[in-house]
Image: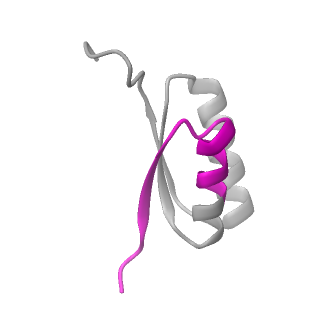
Amino acid sequence: MGSRIALVTGPTAGIGRSFAHQLAQRGCDLGLVSHDAPRLEAESGQLQSLYGIEVEVIVADLTDRKQ
């Protein structure tokens, strides 16, 4: 069976961060979306290091329709 991939918005704090860690712990590769690039990169590195998963980082403000 192929790899599972989950898309998580707001993964640098709160419930989004909790979801990202729970999914990574279960072996899901992640796509992470946030407008805060430095925090997003730091969280991505931590998830990869802790759980050995692949992470795709997407820097975007989902509240901005012009992006």
Residue situated in front as seen by the camera: 44 or 15: 15
Task: In the displayed orientation, state which residue is furthest to the bottom.
Answer: 1
Q: Nearer the viewer, residue 67 or 17?
A: 17
Give the number of callouts. Answer: 0
Which x, y percent locates residue 29? 49, 62
Give x and y (percent) for residue 54.
Answer: 52, 59
Farthest residue, direction left? 66
Image quadrant for the C terminus?
top left
49 is higher (above) or lower (below) than 44: below
Colour convention of the picture:
one colour
Residue 58, located in which quarter of the rendered image? top left
Q: Residue at x 64, y 62 (%)?
A: 22
The quarter of the displayed image where residue 24 is located: bottom right
As for residue 57 lying within the magenta part, the answer is no
Question: Is 4 left, or right, of 19 in this rendering?
Answer: left
* Left or right: residue 17 compared with residue 6: right
Which residue range is magenta in the image? 1-21
The quadrant in which the N terminus is found is bottom left
Task: Indicate yes or no whether the magenta region holds residue 16.
Answer: yes
Q: Is residue 48 above or below residue 59?
A: below
Q: Position of residue 41 (x, y in %)?
A: 61, 35
Name the residue rendered at 54%, 35% in the picture: 10
Lateral position of residue 8 relative to residue 16, left or right: left
Residue located 68% across and 35% down the image? 13
Identified at 43% across, 58% down, the residue is: 6
Q: Position of residue 38 (x, y in %)?
A: 64, 25
Return the residue found at the far front.
15
